[in-house]
């Protein structure tokens, strides 16, 4: 029996290691080559940071990165507002209306990005005659992509909240806006932050929607990388290895920070719970 248990642990460990290698080995390999002077994968040359110098000193690359980040942040702000308000509205609606809103929200989530991008382009550019050079189709497409995911991130936090606190605030004289701002929103801030972070990630990663809706003179990281692999200069291609490494490191640091913060809060809550139990036991002993 012990041998079987030991074999199971070994098998699980080996399987987990293979999964991690499958997921992260290509990224780590790319990171290694980003610190070399190699012009193609397969032949490692001497150590060099020239790729990072090129990345942060080439105006085309820096403008592309800055534009992508600004687009992601702006779209995420709008999507977070719409997704949060939609989740709150669905939660406080009647059962059938709430189910209908939730179902409609799931359609853009499972829909293909290429369909969303093409539809936004037809609606705004062809039907409504919005200039594609105005960035409006691009922002609208990214908001359409991100807002449903914000809805899904916020809704679980709302469901954990006591639904009667909003009505209680109204009974105590608060206006609907004040009750929403001072009572409901503070209860769901973690979900809003998670939704915003998810929206930023989705916008940074998007290719198809940006490809259909972006102005001709603008490139996001995704569209630039795809186009660069079709004939850009070698120095630009290798600088993109450095860009991929930087993005990966930033994501890792953010995830580690969020996990450390969550663990710290969990320990604080456990400590607070133990103190309450000790205080309750002390009170019972005093009464006895």
Image (tube, grey):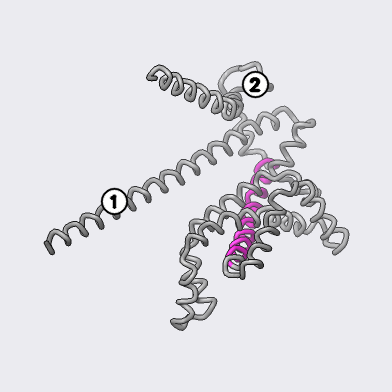
Distance from disc 1 to disc 2, alpha carbons, whole Å, reads: 53 Å
Residue 211 located left or right of residue 51: right
For label 1, the residue is 271
Q: Give the crowd class for mark 1: few <14, some 14-19, many >=20 residues within 10 Å.
A: few
Q: Nearer the viewer, mark 1 or mark 2?
A: 1
286 and 262: which one is in front? Answer: 286
Query: What is the quadrant of residue 233 in the picture?
Result: top right
For label 2, the residue is 38
Residue 37, position as x, y percentages in the image = 62, 22
Residue for point 51% across, 24% down? 17
Residue 245, position as x, y percentages in the image = 58, 33
Disc 1 element? helix
167 and 194: which one is in front? Answer: 167
Residue for point 53% across, 24% down? 15
Magenta-drawn segment = 60-88
Above or below for 68 versus 191: above
The N terminus is located in which quarter?
top left
Disc 2 element? loop
Membership of 17 in magenta stretch: no
Residue 254, position as x, y percentages in the image = 50, 44
Residue 63, position as x, y percentages in the image = 67, 46
Membership of 67 in magenta stretch: yes
């Amino acid at each position: 029996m012990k041998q079987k248990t030991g074999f199971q642990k070994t098998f699980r460990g080996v399987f987990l290691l293979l999964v991690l290698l499958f997921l992260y080995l290509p990224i780590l390999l790319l990171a290694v080559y980003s610190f070399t002077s190699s012009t193609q994968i397969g032949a490692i040359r001497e150590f060099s940071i020239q790729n990072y110098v090129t990345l942060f000193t080439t105006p085309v690359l820096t403008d592309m990165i800055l534009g992508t980040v600004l687009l992601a942040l702006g779209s995420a702000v709008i999507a977070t507002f719409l997704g949060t308000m939609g989740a709150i509205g669905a939660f406080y609606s009647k059962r059938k209306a709430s189910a209908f809103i939730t179902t409609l929200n799931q359609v853009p989530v499972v829909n293909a990005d290429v369909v969303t991008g093409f539809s936004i382009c037809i609606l705004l550019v062809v039907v409504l005659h919005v200039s594609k050079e105005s960035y409006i189709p691009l922002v609208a497409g990214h908001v359409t992509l991100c807002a449903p995911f914000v809805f899904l991130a916020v809704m679980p936090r709302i469901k954990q909240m006591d639904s009667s606190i909003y009505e209680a605030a109204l009974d105590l004289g608060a206006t609907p806006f004040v009750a929403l701002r001072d009572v409901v929103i503070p209860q769901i801030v973690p979900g809003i932050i998670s939704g915003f972070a998810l929206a930023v990630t989705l916008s940074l990663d998007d290719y198809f929607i940006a490809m259909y809706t972006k102005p001709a003179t603008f490139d996001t990281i995704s569209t630039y990388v795809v186009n660069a692999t079709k004939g850009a200069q070698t120095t630009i291609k290798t600088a993109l290895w450095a860009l991929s490494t930087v993005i990966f490191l930033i994501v890792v640091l953010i995830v580690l920070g969020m996990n450390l913060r969550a663990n710290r809060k969990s320990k604080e809550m456990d400590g607070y719970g133990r103190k309450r139990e000790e205080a309750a036991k002390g009170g019972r002993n005093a009464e006895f």
